[in-house]
Image: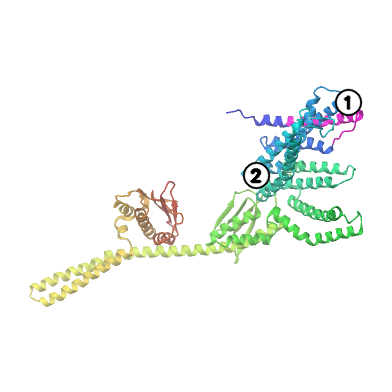
Amino acid sequence: MKPVLGDRALVRAACAVAAAGVLSCAAVIPLHHWVAARAEIIPLYSADLVLGTVWPAVGALVAVRQPRNRAAWLLLLTSVIGPYLLLAHYAAADAMIRPLPGAAFGAWVASWGFAVYWLCVPLLPVLFPDGRAPSRRWGLFARAVAAAGGCAALAAMLHPGGTDISPRVVNPLGVEGLAGPLGTVTMAGSYATLFFGTLGGVACLVWRGRRATGVERDQLQWLMLGGLVMGVCLGFAALYSSTAPLPEIAMSAGLFALPASIVVAVLRHRLFDVEALLGRSVVYTLLSGFVLAVYAVAVIWLGRLAMGSSLGYLLVGAAAVTVAAGHGAVQRWVESLLFGHRRDPYAVVSRVGRQVAPAGEPVEALERLVDALRRELEVPYVAFAGPAAEVSSGSPVTDLHTVPCPALGRDLGDLRVGLRHPGERLLPQEREAVAEVAGRAATLAYAAGLVQDVAASRARIVAAREEERRRLRADLHDGLGPVLAGTAHQLDALARRLGRAGHEEWSQQLRGQRDRVKAAVGDLRTVVQGLRPPILDQLGLPGALRELVSGYETPVCSHLVAPECADLPAAVEVAAYRIAAEAVSNGVRHSAAGSLRLLAEISGGRFVLTVEDNGRGLPARPRAGVGLGSMRERAEEVGGRLDLLAVPGGGTRVRAVLPLKE
């Protein structure tokens, strides 16, 4: 394996790269004045200096915290701007003042060193804050942008002609015969990265921001705010036609805003509500852009209005009235786009209610409710805790917003919402939505308690029924049954004595009574066997289960019965035996199993019965037949549950969990 550069070395390298870029920018300023004093004035923009100093410094700050973060190294890529400006001015001094050694290399760097512009802005929204693309698809987009920027940079390295610093500084490696194709590649690559790449980066930032939670979401929102300020400033600089320094100041401020927002995002300064600031900034930017666009269309495209004309003012006023009328709708649309529906409590409650509606029972509805609330508010954790049910969604956090859930004068539990990061407070709209949802949670918890009471009452009834059946069977089998059998024997003996004494008619009548008593004994035996499986009283549950599987040769059946299974409630014994009999029968008849395993054990105050085979397994959509429904009903009657599971590698596992105590 290749040795991996250690984190400390990466931090030192990042600081060195940033320092080199900053020092190069510092050295450019006196060199620029020296060249301008002895020859013609060459351009030096403050925006370039901001890009070459502030951006790499912020990249080094991120690298100190996360040395392997690709976003940090993308910011550090702007360190090339300093050497690019320094070498370009050096080449200009060679061309305009006097020959200097190595100036050809400076002229070559001056022809392509600005290429870092094409990569940083489109790729930063994709890689920030963790240095990874949010999905494979966005990773392919980042590679495509990098490839387009790389091709444009290679074409610029070989494109002949003058450079941005001065037409007199010519690319020494330019290929004259390929000027047209190389210029086309350079132009196409620059437009592809700066225009389409930036649009894709913004789309990725919005997409990722809506799905992120906690600190990552806050960091992305700070980046959105900085990107918005930068876009407004750069747009103003591009449209402003004056020669005053205002456009240059606006461009510098825009290039400073983005790294400044990254600094705040990294340091996580929670000085005010970034969401409110971001939402209002987007709204006012859109509305201001609409007014300016209306005026620009009239002035530039139609060419009918003069600057400062009354008709122009009237048009701007009409646009302003339209903006005022639509401000609320635009605000709601922007907040829905950036933050989902969590700032509209009624929308949150409505969407949560739609998620809960398909639930089949109160506990499932509670599970759906907490999961839907977590997703709608985009928080890391939501839970409901009460005597009737405890459900949760997400990863637990320490800081919680807790709301009590009373209903019908009873305290039914608490709804707990995890905060996105320590020290945060939910917005008033979010607290209102949580309070509304807490009322629904209380109603569901009350219904869950009623269902539990009904199930417990049913289990008690079934347990009492089975205990009474066991007692009645014992009384009939050991009491009335032997009495009737003895009476039949006595009648038979008396009939024989009367026959020998010559009273054949009376003997026949007694034999008829004897047969009726024997028939009653048979009927009684049938009733006794119907009350409870006789094998349970003869062998107990362990012996009955052993007898259940011992009669099969194929599939080969093995079983393990815990020794403490001897003394069980009558209802549990009957339910376990009936479920085991049905499961074994299904495994033998329907699954074509080569082996079948039956396991019975007591664990945690519950009787657990497992029947597992290696047959063909469950169908894709198993149909609930009579056997499966009967097994599930017998388990639920005693307050237990039945699970039907697929075994890895093929086969079916039937698992019944039956409580031993109420």
Q: For mark 1, what is the residue?
A: 97
- Vertical side of 11 occupied by 298: above or below: below
Badge 2 density bin: few <14, some 14–19, many ≥20, Cα 10 Å:
some
Q: Residues within 10 Å of mark 1 (few under 14, many from 20)?
A: few
Going by the picture, which residue comes out furthest to the bottom? Answer: 505
Identify the coloring: rainbow
Q: Which residue, as the protein is rendered here, is positioned at the far top?
A: 101
* 238 with respect to 16 (left or right): right
Q: For residue 42: magenta?
A: yes
Q: In which quarter of the image is residue 175?
A: top right
Q: Does residue 594 sit above or below 3 in this rendering?
A: below
Closer to us: mark 1 or mark 2? 1
- Viewer-proximal residue among 157 and 439: 157
The answer to whether residue 619 is left or right of residue 45 is left
Q: Which of 333/182 is in front?
A: 182
Q: What residue type is labelled 1?
A: Ile
Q: Is residue 328 left or right of residue 474?
A: right
Q: Which of 168 and 560 is in front in this view?
A: 168
Spot occupied by residue 310 in the image (x, y as percentages of width and height): 91, 59
Identify the element where label 1 is drawn: loop
- Give the labeled residue for mark 2: 138
Q: Residue 552, position in %: x, y?
A: 30, 52
> What secondary structure predominates along the stretch shown in magenta?
helix
For the record, the magenta segment spans: 15-44
**On the rendered image, what quadrant is the C terminus found in?**
bottom left
The relative height of residue 260 versus residue 494 in the rendered view (above or below) is above
Quadrant of the snapshot with the N terminus = top right
**Dot 1 or dot 2, earlier in sequence:** 1
Q: Mark 2 is on which residue type?
A: Trp
